[in-house]
Image: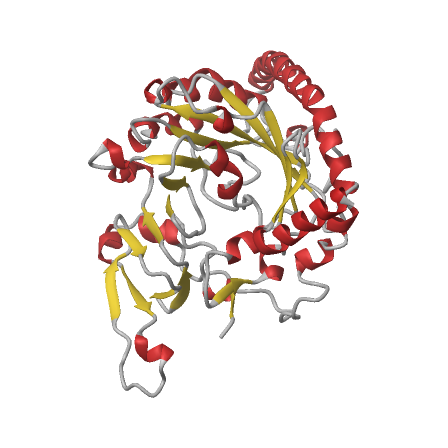
Amino acid sequence: MKEEAVRAGELAFFLDSGIYTVDDSSAVFFLDPIRILARSYCRYRPRRYAYYSRSFDPPEKSVDEHQIGDSSGATTKKRKRTKLKKKNLKKTEDLKRNEREIAAEGRHTEARPFLLNAHECFLRSADLLSLLPSVTGRGDEPREPPSEPESPSCDFVELGGVWQASLWEISLCFRSQADEQPDMDETPAKTVVPLFENPVANNTDDDAEAEFLHNHFILPRRSCFHMSDLRRIHDLIPANSDDGYTLIVIDPPWENASVSQKYPTLPSRHFLYIPVQQLAHKRGALVALWITNREKLRIFVEKELLPKWGITDFSILYWLKVKDDGSLIGNLDLFHHRPYECLILGYTNSQEMNGGCDENRRLPESGVIISVPGAHSRKPPLGDVLSKFVPRPGKSLELFARELRSDWTSWGNEPLRFQDSSFFLKLN
């Protein structure tokens, strides 16, 4: 009876917060991102069918370079030399690739039992699984329009790169007293501010609306965003290190041929110039870095990037992706399309943390977050899960953000990507 009461309490907490503790002992959680995001809004809520619109299509076939003909018109002798050189180069690359693949397979083999156990624990949570159909908008929740939401017609990445970027302005409209009392004859005041390379904030306890180039956006309460590219990231550094961020989440656009057509990517070495230690609170901050499963990238992060950011020790949090029936989105052992991603957790400026965090805030050896994935590369909001590891209360920052959240500063070249009004339902 006691265990049933505990589970009933956890289900009630899940319905309210969007977080369900699957297994306390091994730090396994199930998240419903929509419930979590909805807590940032008062008069709006994110559309479920818009968030969970991602289909589970088979991976795209890669182009076989051996099927591409040589139309250079070079002589036969020259073609043979070129072919031999490419063959030798390919052997060297294959050797390095094989070494990395072996190392990657070793990491996977080590994590596999932990991930399988987490998924099995999740599948044993019968009460939670009975609620999963509502995750994608079915069940007892109101039906939503079948049409897909429209993506913003303006391309922030392109607009931010032109010389006129400093001239673009966004119009902000905050809910006034007249909106709450219709009989009052008062026109809501609008605030017009620069959009690019300028902090734009909604410091009220209510949602705000914004307009830019005939596109409408919803800003959650107590949120701030700063839209710029990597060259202006130093503008985020606080004037006083006591005002630095205590939680920094980073989701870099890692260079990858398969995603370069979906959004702009950057070479890995560009991220060495992110001033993480200057952005962080001088007495320590938790840094959470999303990383792909590529072994070459993992080596770069561990050997170069983390030391550059002042992070010496780290833990791994796994994001395990499931369908709305609870099954994995793909074969766990499929080499190039594993159904999980990694989040590296570590402390920067830790030498100033008075010997480190207290026992209740030490990083776990590992953990698993389970959720249904949203749009491509859209990560679940982990602020509530990570808060227990933050060294002290303070400000939170997301780098390369594409959406806004309450009590966070969101920086990137398209932080309004998922704030278009077509992604929301108005409640009243």
> What percent of the width, then of the height, locates residue 380?
55, 45
- The reply to whether residue 57 is visible in this rendering is no
The vertical placement of 305 against 115, above or below, is above
Q: What's the residue at 31%, 31% (across, down)? A: 281
Q: 378 or 318, which lies in front?
A: 318
Q: 50 or 18, which lies in front?
A: 18
Q: Quadrant of residue 366?
A: top right
Left or right: 377 as drawn, with respect to 54: left
Task: Kindly give the residue lying farthest to the left in the view shown.
Answer: 239
- The reply to whether residue 322 is visible in this rendering is yes
Q: What's the residue at 33%, 48% (across, down)? A: 227
> What percent of the width, then of the height, locates residue 273?
33, 27
The vertical placement of 13 against 190, above or below, is above
Q: What's the residue at 54%, 40% (across, down)? A: 259
Q: 26 or 201, which lies in front?
A: 26
> What is the quadrant of the N terminus in the image?
top right
